[in-house]
Image (cartoon, rainbow, N blue to C red):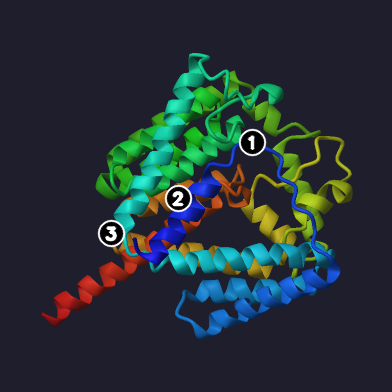
Amino acid sequence: MKKYTLIALFFLIALSLIPPIDVVLRNPQDKYWLWMVLIAGFFGVFTLFIKTHWMVRIIAIGSFIDCFFSAAPYISFTSYCSIVLCCYFYISCCNIEDWPLVFKAVQSLLLLNAILLSLEFFHKDNLMDWGAAYNFNFGVLGHHMQMGSFAVVISALLISFSTLNFLFPVIVAVFCQSSWAFFSAGAGAVVYMYSKNKNVAAMVFIGFMFIFCLWDLSNNKFKENLSPAAGRITVWQKTFELANKHPFVGWGPGTYKLIFAPLSRMKSIPYKTAHNFIAQLVFEVGYPATGCLLFGLGWLCGALWRAELYTLTSGLAMIVIDALVHFPDRCMQMVPLIIVFLAYCTFCLKKDKLCLTHSLLS
């Protein structure tokens, strides 16, 4: 087996199968922590001298510099170590030698969760009922919202091989009562249909929006999200309000989960994520860095569309839309899947460019 494929498979499978358990990692002693941060900083700077995407260099070096302006430097520099690991995981995935094997592993993850959900539906999972203590039990992740988001990310990868994979997050959304997973899958399907027939896409979009609104109204989803005490809208408003106090550099990478609750003084559950990746990025790293990342996503979307890689464009839309209400970019089970998806997009764009060059030369 090729080494880069092995690296990708190891992290992809190991992290994607983490069940809903509490993992406590002790902070290292000061002298070891400083050594760890310096090594991470070195590898961040080292991205300047290796072949990788320009956005990786901006993230690796820009995040390190931003940590010095953090309101909680210890938290930010510790988080930075994981950011560097993600950057190098992406670099490794861009060199994967056996993509079919990787996608077989992703298909296995999908099927495993489908089996678990089926057995949970018939209450035949007593031995593995890890969600009993939390009053939920959905697939590997346990939580209904996170499981719906997980299904969206997996399907974003697999629709390149079969558009039937649009159905998986819809089925999971119905089973887990996650309306936004349904919305994300439907939006991705509309994007794909738009590339084939604009009129059909428009009709599907209208029908899809009707079902979504009816679902949310019948389950009081709109009421929950608009609640002034704990609704997402209120949290987003407070997030931007606090972000505006540090508009250029933010409060620091990785600080949201620990400092938003005491800063916001909201009388609700202590939000550890903003349930909106744009709002959380603005809070943590400021408007300029967030704008740069959004530009990178827009550039990638445009490049995929121009290359007629419509399934990948749809997959990217699904992940981004899901991240506007959920937090797949903050779940360790989903981050490797997202990175593999981005690396596969890079691989396909390079392949398309090579084919175009070859056709022009011939």
Name above or below for residue 315 compared with residue 60.
above
Q: CA distance from mark 3 to mark 1?
A: 39 Å
Could you say which disc has been placed on residue 308 in the image?
Answer: 3
Q: Residue at x 75, y 43 (%)?
A: 235
Image coordinates for residue 281, horizontal then vertical, percent: 67, 59
Residue where numbered disc 1 is placed: 20
Which image quarter is the C terminus in?
A: bottom left
Mark 2 near mark 1, Cβ–Cβ under 8 Å? no
Q: Residues within 10 Å of mark 2 (few under 14, many from 20)?
A: many
Q: Residue at x 73, y 35 (%)?
A: 231
Identify the secondary structure beneath mark 2.
helix
Q: Foreground: 99 or 143?
A: 99
Badge 3 amino acid: Glu
The mark lying in front, picked from 2 and 1, is 1
Q: CA distance from mark 3 to mark 2?
A: 15 Å
Badge 2 amino acid: Ala
Identify the secondary structure beneath mark 3.
loop
Q: Residue furthest bottom?
A: 49
Badge 1 amino acid: Pro
Upstream in sequence: badge 3 or badge 1: 1
Upstream in sequence: badge 3 or badge 2: 3
Could you say which disc has been placed on residue 317 in the image?
Answer: 2
Q: Residues within 10 Å of mark 3 (few under 14, many from 20)?
A: some
Image coordinates for residue 304, horizontal then vertical, percent: 35, 61
Q: Residue at x 59, y 34 (%)?
A: 145
